[in-house]
Each structure stands twice: as structure tokens, then as C-alpha cells.
């Protein structure tokens, strides 16, 4: 990880400052919980087997309090406390005539999304790798002006930039990569409906997203107009759910379901609620990160009629935890919608202990519970995004015990071929003696738990 990126990781502090502005009266109540002396006791011999120290970085800096710097000098939040300095400067430079009302209108954001290299090059200095991309790229280019405002104009290594700006590496097909690695098309009884697990289905409402992630698992379908948000297709999927009583959980995804207009989404939700055996509805969305303006009071008022409704929000990096996104999440959480997050582990974007911890902490502050950390699927052209499995395990090891249990997601590999999500855990079990289970804790210390082997020793003797 280069120093530049470390310096870019301003978001946790940013949210913190913003929050303080919002809750000035609660300021005094906020204790500095972690001081040097609070560090857990350690029996480590060397820095090398220090689980806090990963790839030359240390989580320790996150665990020690950052000194409070006077707000005036460091405030990353503009005067009205609702946007970051980055977004404010971006608007001033590129959209000086656009009113707050327009900018904060999600339809305006959609209408003005950046969809061509030519337009993108007016905002960013594109690198050679970014410009060499074939124009008929498989996955379309699309970025909302809001999300673009968070991206560094000059640094092609900026994490959010790598997520959404096409790169020539997308054209390299590596061994083991395919367009449908999860075999979704084989497990699809009706177009746009994937039934892989016994009690739940994945219902793809449309193939449209406001902003396309270059590593998208469904890049074979998203943005291509193959999964129409048509009532005829939706009816077929609803019929399937109706006649399959085992389905108690319906996961709406896509594309992004929250890019549909309120009434169209409500139509689906109300139809699902008429099916007795559908107990839970879930929506998978990246909207709070890329188009937070979409989370309007009206949308939330409509959604809360269809409880129990859960949401899985897609986040990649702490730079996405802006005041706008925090407000969107607050509206959803206030409507009683449990919020979980899904994050794809991405090389050079979030594959360090420190970056991942600040994202998880940023999410918790927005009342979003980290749910899954995904190993990047071997989708065609994903080689430059994928890390080793060991990297993911190392990150989980760096979180567990060192931070809130709620901040630790489940690390999963979606099994190529359609085997579903397989959880991977660092190995805390070292072995078993006759009487004890031998384990190591987060600090690498060994502990025993009395667990006599109910070995058929006697049976054998009989
Ligand atoms: C991820 C996924 C689900 C939901 O899985 P959970 O572990 O319940 O969140 C359902 N169907 C498909 C096809 C999926 O990929
Ligand atoms: S938001 Fe989800 S579906 Fe849309 S491009 Fe990103 S990963 Fe794919």
C-alpha cells in the first residue's frame, strides 16, 4: 500500500467530525475509550508474529486515539454539515450553476451520470490504462456525478476510482475465469430468478445500476438490457414463488432494485406480501453509496409498509461513508430496516487490515452491520481485482478480537459452479487431546477447553 492512499483514508475522521457537528450537545459524552494502557496484554515475542501487524501495516494506529485537532483547520465537511469538502469543491468546479435542489434530486443524478470516456476525461486525468479500454466494453461505464465527486481526479490508484473507471485489464481473461462463474443461469427456473438454496430465492428485478462496479459478478447481464424490469417477467417470477412454498425469504437484487421508481418497487413488494409463505423480503442495493439522494422520505415511508424488510448494502471503502450516505442509512435504519453490508475484497482497493477496519467501523457508525466479505468471483477480466484467499483470512484474523465482534463480517467464497457461499475462517483450533480442545486466541496464545473425546475407547475394549 502506498503512502498516498494511507493519506487518503480520511473518512473515519470525516464522519467523526461531521457527527460531532450534528450532535454538538453529545460531544462531551463521547469518551476517549482507548488509551495506550488499554491495549490487551501480549505475550508476543517479536513484531513478526504480531497479529496486529499485517503486510507491514499495523492496526494499532487505529486502536490508538487520534488527537483532536481544532475543527477549523481540518474540517472535511462543508459549512452546512451535509457534504464533504471534496463534493463541495467538485460541484463548484464542474456544476456551478446546479442548485442544491437539483444536485440532491436522484433523478437529476441519474440523468447526468457519466457514461462515456469522452465525458469522463473532462473530470479526470485518465491514465493510459484507463484510456486504452475498448469502447465496446462488456460492462457499460456509468458513474453518478455524486460518486464521481468522491474520486481523486489525478490519482488512478484511488480506491473508489478503480472500482468504477474501466481499465484495460478488464480485457485479460485469466485461467479459471468465466462470464457466469456461479452458474446462476443453470439454477434459474424463470428468467431473472435464481433458486440455489432450499428456502430462499434471488429475484433480479432489472439489470440497471446508476453506477457500474468493474468487478460486478453479474457483468454478463447488468447494463445489457437482458433482464427487463417488465411486469410480464416479474409475474412469471412471482408465480414461481407462489407455487414454491419452501421459499420463505426473497432477495430482490439486480441490477439495483432501488433505481426503480417507488410505485414499481411497491408493486413488487405488495405482490410478495400477498404470498403467505414469504416471511422475509430483502433488498440488495448499492444506492446508499452511489446515489444516496434516492433514499427519500417517500421511499422510506413506502418501504416500511412491507416489514419484515431487510437490506444488504454494498460498500467497498470507507471513502463511501460520507454525510450523504450516513443520512441515507439513518433514514433506512429509522424506518426499522435492519441494514447489513456486503463488501468484495479487492486488490489495491480494500485488501489491507487497516483499510478494512476503517470501512467496518464507518459502517457501524451508520448502523450498518457488516454481513459478508466476499472473495472476488473469478468473473472474466477480474484478475487485477482478485487477491489470494490467504489475504482474506489474514484480514479476518486482524479484526476478530481486536475490534467489536459486530465489525467482523463473515468471509465467504461463492463456490464456482453454483455451490453457494462457503464461509472461510482462520483456524483457531490447533488440535485435540483426550481431554481438551486446544485452541489459539486472537493473540496467538494457546488455551484449553475441557472437551473429553467421547472416543469409543471402552467400546473398542468390549
Ligand atoms: C447470496 C445468495 C442468496 C442469499 O444468501 P444468504 O447467505 O442467505 O444471504 C440467495 N440466493 C443466491 C443465488 C445467492 O447468491
Ligand atoms: S451495484 Fe451490484 S449489480 Fe450493480 S454493478 Fe455494482 S456489483 Fe453489479
Image (cartoon, rainbow, N blue to C red):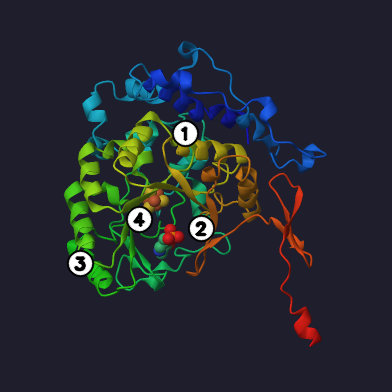
Is 412 above or below relative to 297? below
Dividing the picture into quadrants, the one containing residue 118 is top left
Marks 3 and 1, the one that precedes in the sequence: 3
Q: Which residue is mark 4?
A: 222
Circle 1 or circle 2, nearest the eye = 1
Query: Where is residue 442 drawn, in percent x and y?
Result: 68, 46
Lower position in the chain sequence, tag 4 or tag 1: 4
Q: Determine whether label 3 and label 4 are within 8 Å by CB.
A: no
Indicate which disc, 3 or 2, sits on the residue closer to the N terminus.
3
Query: Mark 4 or mark 2, which has the lower sequence index?
Result: 4
249 up-or-down from 3: above or below: below
Q: Residues within 10 Å of mark 4 (few under 14, many from 20)?
A: many
- Residues under labels 4 and 1: Cα distance? 25 Å
Give the quadrant of residue 367: top left
Find out whether the residues at labels 4 and 2 contact each other: C-beta distance under 8 Å: no
**Circle 4: element type:** loop
How far from the left and from the top, in percent, is residue 306? 24, 53
- Residue 440 placement (x, y as % from top left): 73, 52
Q: CA distance from mark 4 to mark 2?
A: 15 Å
Q: Quadrant of the N terminus?
A: top right
Q: Secondary structure at mark 3?
A: helix
The residue lying furthest to the right in this view is: 45
- Specify the label residue 377 is tagged with: 2
- Element on which disc 2 rests: loop
Task: Place residue 356 in its image quadrant.
Answer: top right
Q: Is mark 4 within 8 Å of ligand 2?
A: yes
Find numbered disc 1 in the image and state the secondary structure of the residue it sits on: helix
Residue pointed to by mark 3: 235
Quadrant showing the C terminus: bottom right
Q: Which residue is mark 1?
A: 319
The reply, left or right, for residue 319 in relation to residue 201 is: right
Nearest-to-viewer mark from 4 and 1: 1
Amino acid at each position: 500500500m502506498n503512502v498516498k492512499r494511507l493519506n487518503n483514508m480520511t473518512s473515519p475522521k470525516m464522519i467523526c467530525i461531521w457527527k460531532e457537528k450534528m450532535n454538538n450537545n453529545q460531544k462531551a459524552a463521547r469518551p476517549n475509550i482507548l488509551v495506550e494502557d488499554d491495549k490487551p496484554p501480549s505475550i508476543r515475542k517479536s513484531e513478526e508474529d504480531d497479529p496486529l501487524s499485517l503486510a507491514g501495516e499495523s492496526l494499532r494506529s487505529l486502536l490508538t486515539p487520534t488527537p483532536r485537532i481544532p475543527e477549523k483547520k481540518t474540517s472535511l465537511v462543508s459549512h452546512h454539515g451535509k457534504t464533504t469538502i471534496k463534493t463541495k469543491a467538485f460541484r463548484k468546479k464542474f456544476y456551478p450553476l446546479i442548485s442544491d435542489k437539483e444536485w440532491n434530486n436522484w433523478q437529476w443524478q441519474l440523468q447526468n451520470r457519466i457514461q462515456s470516456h469522452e465525458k469522463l476525461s473532462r473530470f479526470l486525468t485518465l491514465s493510459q490504462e484507463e484510456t486504452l479500454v475498448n469502447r465496446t466494453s462488456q460492462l457499460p461505464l456509468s458513474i453518478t456525478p455524486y460518486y464521481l465527486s468522491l474520486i481523486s481526479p489525478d490519482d488512478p490508484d484511488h480506491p473508489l476510482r478503480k472500482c468504477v473507471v474501466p481499465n484495460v485489464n478488464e480485457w485479460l481473461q485469466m485461467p479459471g475465469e468465466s462470464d457466469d462463474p456461479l452458474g446462476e443461469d443453470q439454477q434459474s427456473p424463470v428468467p431473472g430468478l435464481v433458486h440455489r438454496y432450499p428456502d430462499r430465492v434471488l429475484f433480479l428485478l432489472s439489470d440497471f445500476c446508476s453506477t457500474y462496479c468493474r468487478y460486478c459478478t453479474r457483468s454478463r447481464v447488468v447494463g445489457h438490457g437482458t433482464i427487463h424490469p417488465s411486469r410480464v417477467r416479474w409475474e412469471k417470477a412471482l408465480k414461481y414463488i407462489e407455487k414454491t412454498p419452501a421459499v420463505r425469504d426473497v432477495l430482490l437484487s439486480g441490477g439495483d432494485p432501488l433505481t426503480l421508481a417507488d410505485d414499481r418497487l411497491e408493486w413488487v413488494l405488495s405482490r410478495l406480501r400477498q404470498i403467505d409463505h414469504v416471511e422475509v423480503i430483502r433488498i440488495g442495493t448499492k444506492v446508499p453509496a452511489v446515489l444516496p439522494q434516492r433514499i427519500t422520505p417517500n421511499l422510506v415511508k413506502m418501504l416500511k409498509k412491507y416489514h419484515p424488510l431487510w437490506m444488504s448494502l454494498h460498500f467497498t471503502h470507507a471513502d463511501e461513508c460520507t454525510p450523504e450516505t450516513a443520512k441515507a442509512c439513518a433514514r433506512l435504519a429509522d424506518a426499522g430496516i435492519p441494514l447489513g453490508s456486503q463488501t468484495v475484497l479487492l486488490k489495491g482497493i480494500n485488501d489491507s487490515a487497516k483499510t478494512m477496519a476503517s470501512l467496518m467501523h464507518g459502517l457501524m457508525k451508520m448502523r450498518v452491520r457488516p454481513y459478508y466479505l466476499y472473495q472476488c468471483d473469478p468473473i472474466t477480466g477480474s484478475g487485477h481485482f482478485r487477491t489470494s484467499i490467504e489475504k482474506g483470512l489474514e484480514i479476518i484474523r486482524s479484526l476478530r478480537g481486536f475490534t467489536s465482534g459486530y465489525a467482523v463480517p463473515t468471509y465467504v467464497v461463492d463456490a464456482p459452479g453454483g455451490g453457494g457461499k462457503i464461509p472461510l475462517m482462520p483456524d483457531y483450533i490447533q488440535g485435540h487431546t483426550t481431554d481438551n480442545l486446544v485452541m489459539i486466541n486472537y493473540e496467538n496464545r494457546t488455551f484449553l477447553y475441557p472437551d473429553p473425546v467421547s472416543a469409543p475407547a471402552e467400546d473398542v475394549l468390549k
